[in-house]
Image (spheres, rainbow, N blue to C red):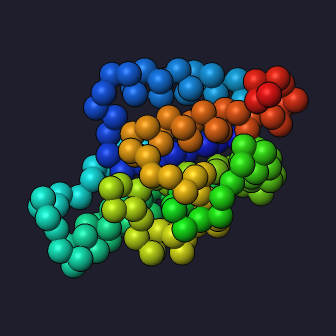
């Protein structure tokens, strides 16, 4: 069974987001071994300078990269990534299950991901040109992974 790891900057503080996350993790048990790794966001002042932002991104990158194993297939979730449909996510899941035991999705914090993390990624995925709060996006990603598995299984959820 494929392992899915979602590495996120920040925690889900709102109970409704935690409950939604738990629900999708429960649903995913039929298809994969999914886990979420939360990394604390680097502390920044209210109006950070570019240098402070870059330092924070690098600190977060160090923590993210420690959570990725050498053989993992990685997907950086970032605005400059290729727009992916649900069918594209399903194809990625199918292809990655043949190439590696673990597919890793990486969600950055408020300022995104460092270039080091993006360079480590096998693919860069964008799901929309719109901007979403990171806690909401985590739920959206979980839903799309679930949808991808349903598509690959030929089940009707995705219609």
Q: How far from the left and from the top, in percent, is residue 39? A: 34, 49
Residue 89 or residue 29, whichever sits in front:
89
Dividing the image into 4 quarters, which one contains the N terminus? top right
Q: How far from the left and from the top, in percent, is residue 70? A: 59, 64
Residue 97 or residue 106, whichever sits in front:
106
Q: Residue furthest bottom?
A: 51
Q: Residue at x 41, y 65 (%)?
A: 113
Residue 86 or residue 42, whichever sits in front:
86
Dividing the image into 4 quarters, which one contains the C terminus? top right
Q: Is residue 111 above or below residue 132?
A: below
Q: Residue at x 40, y 28 (%)?
A: 17
Would you identify the image quadrant in which residue 122 lies?
Answer: bottom right
Give the mark count: 0
Q: How far from the left and from the top, in percent, is residue 32? A: 68, 33
Q: Is residue 37 above or below residue 15?
A: below
Q: Residue at x 64, y 38 (%)?
A: 144
Q: Residue furthest right?
A: 154
Q: Is residue 16 in view?
A: yes
Q: Is residue 101 above or below residue 18?
A: below
Q: Residue at x 51, y 61 (%)?
A: 78
In the image, 73: left or right of 133? right
Q: Is residue 93 in view?
A: no
In the image, 120: left or right of 2? left
Q: How far from the left and from the top, in percent, is residue 150? A: 77, 30
């Amino acid at each position: 069974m494929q392992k899915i790891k979602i590495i996120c900057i920040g925690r889900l503080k709102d109970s409704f987001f935690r409950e939604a996350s738990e629900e999708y993790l429960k649903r995913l048990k039929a298809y994969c071994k999914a886990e979420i790794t939360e990394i604390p966001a680097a502390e920044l002042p209210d109006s950070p300078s570019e240098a402070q932002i870059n330092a924070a991104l690098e600190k977060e990158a160090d923590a993210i990269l420690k959570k990725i194993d050498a053989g993992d297939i990685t997907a950086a979730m970032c605005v400059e990534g290729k727009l992916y449909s649900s069918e594209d996510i399903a194809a990625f899941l199918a292809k990655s299950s043949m190439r590696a035991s673990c597919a890793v999705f990486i969600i950055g914090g408020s300022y995104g991901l460092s270039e080091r993390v993006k360079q480590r990624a096998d693919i860069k995925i964008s799901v929309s040109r719109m901007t979403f709060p990171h806690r909401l996006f985590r739920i959206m990603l979980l839903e799309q992974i679930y949808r991808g598995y349903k598509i690959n299984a030929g089940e009707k959820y995705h219609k």
